[in-house]
Image (cartoon, rainbow, N blue to C red):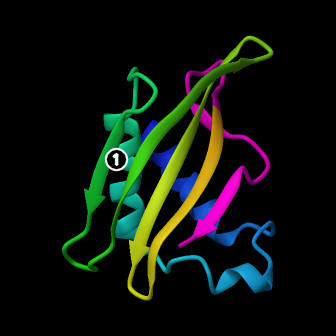
Amino acid sequence: MKKTLLSLSMVMLINTPLVSADWASAIPKLTVEDLEKISEAVSVGLEDQPVGTKVEWSNDNTGSHGSVTLTRLFEVASQECRRIRYQLSARERDNWRIDFDFCKTEDGLWERQPGLIALEDS
């Protein structure tokens, strides 16, 4: 379930209204397989890890690659929360980064919090 939730979060990232038409060309084009690899890196590599933990991922089929980094642990209204930095390189876009906050629900699932934390294309 965690994997599905995180995959859906990444899909929402790409298809969300917060991404204006001007930003659409800045977002790397990721496949479902890419999103699954990112989700696995987060759910397996960052669970119960200290701030600064970085997990690399890659997809040999598409050439996409990147990393996920746990950059902050915090609480909001007694909920355990964390900030994750996604670094992505896919086809025409290299070294694209975005940070999102996730908080753990009462069901133990990580839910992406509204709002864009940081977006960089370098």
Residue 59's quadrant in the figure? bottom left
Residue 4 is a magenta residue:
no
Could you say which is closer to the camera, residue 22 or residue 6? 22
Is 77 placed left or right of 85 in the picture?
right
Is 66 placed left or right of 14 in the picture?
left
Is 88 placed left or right of 13 in the picture?
left
The residue most toward the front is 122
Is 92 placed left or right of 112 in the picture?
left
> Image point 49% across, 54% down: which residue?
86
Residue 38's quadrant in the figure? bottom left
Residue 113 is a magenta residue:
yes
Query: x, y (%) of residue 90?
Result: 40, 78
Give the extent of the magenta segment: 103-122
> Image point 33% across, 73% down: which residue?
64
* Residue at the disc numbered 1: 40
Q: How many numbered circles does the render carry?
A: 1
Query: x, y (%) of residue 112?
Result: 66, 42
